[in-house]
Amino acid sequence: MIDPVQLYAWHFMSYPYLPADFDEKYDSGWVTVPNKLWDKDRSRGLLNTYIDQLAYADELGFDGMVLNEHHQNIYGLMPSPNIIAAALTQRTKRGKIVVLGNLLPLHANPLRVAEEYAMIDNMSDGRLIAGFAPGSGPETFNYNVASAPSRDQFWEAVELIRQAWTREGPFMFEGHHYPLRYVNPWPQPTQRPHPDIWIPGARSRDTLTQIAKNGYCYFLSSRSHGKDTAKAVDRFADTLKAHGDRYMPKRMGILMSTYVAETDAIAQEESREGIWYFLRNCLKGHQRREGRQLTFGPGVPYIPPNEFRDYLAQSDPTTPLLGDTQDWGDLQRAQSIIVGSPDTVFERFMSVLEHAPVGHLLIQFHMGNMSDECARKSMRLFWDEVAPRLKRETGRMFNERFGRDEAALEAVKA
Amino acid sequence: MSAQLIQVSGRMVSLIESGGGEPTVYLHGFADVHGVAGDLMPFHAALAERTRLIAPAHPGCNGSDDLPGPHSIEDAVFHYLEVFDALGLKEFNLVGHSVGGWIAAEIAVRHPDMIRKLVLIGATGLFVSNEPIGDVFMHTQPERGVDYSTLRRMYFSAADEPLALRYYPDGRGDLDEETRRYQMIRFCSFVGFKPPYLYNRSLIDRLHRAKMPSLVVWGEKDGLTPIAHGHAYARGLPGSGPLKIIHGAGHAAHVEARGETCEAIADFLRR
């Protein structure tokens, strides 16, 4: 039997106390956003409120909680997601703890990540999902990581960590970037041979190949969904096939954001401020045309020139990005933030999943400066009134569409 | 003039050769041949009237293969030693602009006997306290997705300078030119992103080894490499006179004020 879709609560931990005229006065919410805007009095307890929201998701029954790493911005106050993950090991009992992920090229020695992840896996009794990411444009500037060699550095670090968890130590690692004489980490992870590894990717063909070849899980790093999401599933399925494997929903995840309330009108009313704070402020410098977007482009040259040329030929630099969204209609078309009653949210999530049958839905509930009360209400309504239907429908759909492939895979293994 | 591909240790290197007489190797920068233009610009053509000009494209740029694996400024220097071997060049003039000037200086301090005369135009490469080289990586990211005015100001005296607008127009530019711009910034990311940016902290104390006659030329309004770096090169290179300042010009002084810059360099090479 193939599992129904797994539902996770993702918290970005944005900074909620920006002045009302932030968008007029400041060019970016990333890298150069002045940290004098940090209000230390109002911010007391903020990170604990966010941790409490994730623990609440675990109490409700979500399949897991998702954290990620960001630096020097207002979008995510989690420079070290491992610290939040460590707190969650003590506050939660059931759900997976998904760290998506540690940005490996930012670490002088990725062995430290192997060690910290092993600690989290032990402290959570085997609930860690280990995400690794290379970091993108902003991190290049924040930590002075050269873009051009960063992908090479990233894959070497992933390989080092995988070996550190699976090879008998001590062994010597003959890396270009991380040559090490003695690799022999203690403790080792609880999960054997190692925690599931998830890796985000968007445009790079090389990323898909590496993920397929090594049996990792592919997280599509895009905030908007439509034809391109379905295409990404197809491309990943083709890549798996080329490596003697088959696509299964559990091999892929996507991010969606939602706000659920009793009716569509109430949902819009309650989420309006948080969503527009998120779009205008948190995405400024990341996914907005206004200002200087640092996430992708010629100044962060991490993809090969031929792929950049393809990107130039196929893209228009004036196309609005998610953060340029003008109204609810625009937002609905982007299929990024789904707002509405439980019926509306179920139907719209299901329509994305019908086109892109992924096994992991990573869902952002808290957006921008949303209140604790609203974030919890939305999570509760989602879990009580949307999740059961999503589980039932995807369980049926996945088994219909992939049951035969799964049987074939099982037969090969046997 | 001929554009050619030569093989160097199994890699292809694209270069343009023009003119005759004493050989002069030209190492390019951003707003330059190979860095954006596919061919020699009027400055290089004028220089080639006085010398045999050889202008290779850096690894990964304008038809040259990448160096294998991740690489540093040291690898770029060694790459050029192999290029000189392949071309049979034993003694020659070396002219470098911007990052090409940095590579030229690194070669000169290691192999002073190879270089007859050295010319640096707006060269990066030095660390000068409180005079940081501009963040060309940040400014290569356009504002509002389309506005390259701050990048143009890094390379030229003004954002609305006609040649600046010709090579770095707002919005989507010519696909070949945008790809060359990308290749050049990518090469710089490999060799010079760390430390921030485009310098080698040891270089300044090594300049004393480069005793050949040298000319350091700087655009008065260089928006990428502060003019203090020009003075530091001129002071540090034993064979250099005072800094030659091109008034009114920016970082790519040879492109923006090609007559005056070319004359100064040609005079120097002739002496």
Image (cartoon, grey):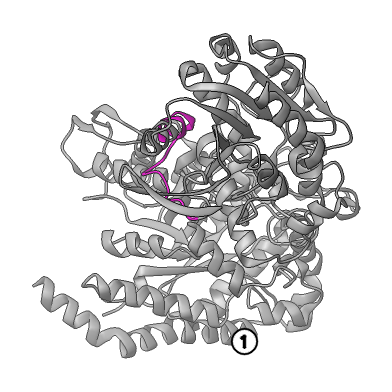
Which residue is located at x 12 percent, y 71 percent?
Answer: A413
> Residue at label 1?
A343
| B74 in magenta | yes
Horizontal and vertical percent position of residue B184: 58, 48
Mark 1: amino acid: Asp
Which image quarter is the N terminus of chain A in?
A: bottom left
Q: In this view of the protein, which residue sits in the foreground, A91 or A282?
A: A282
Horizontal and vertical percent position of residue B103: 54, 30
Q: In this view of the protein, which residue sits in the foreground, B140 or A411?
A: B140
Label 1 neighbourhood size at 10 Å, few (<14), some (14-19), many (20+)? some
Report the side of A57 relative to A275 (left or right): left
Q: Residue furthest bottom?
A: A400
| A15 in magenta | no
Horizontal and vertical percent position of residue B140: 69, 49
Q: Residue furthest front?
A: B21
Report the side of A363 relative to B69 (left or right): right
Relative to A383, is A32 above or below? Answer: above
- Magenta region: B63-79
At numbered mark 1, what does the secondary structure look like: helix, strand or loop?
A: helix
Q: In this view of the protein, which residue sits in the foreground, A62 or B270?
A: B270
Asked if residue A46 can be seen in this view, the reply is no
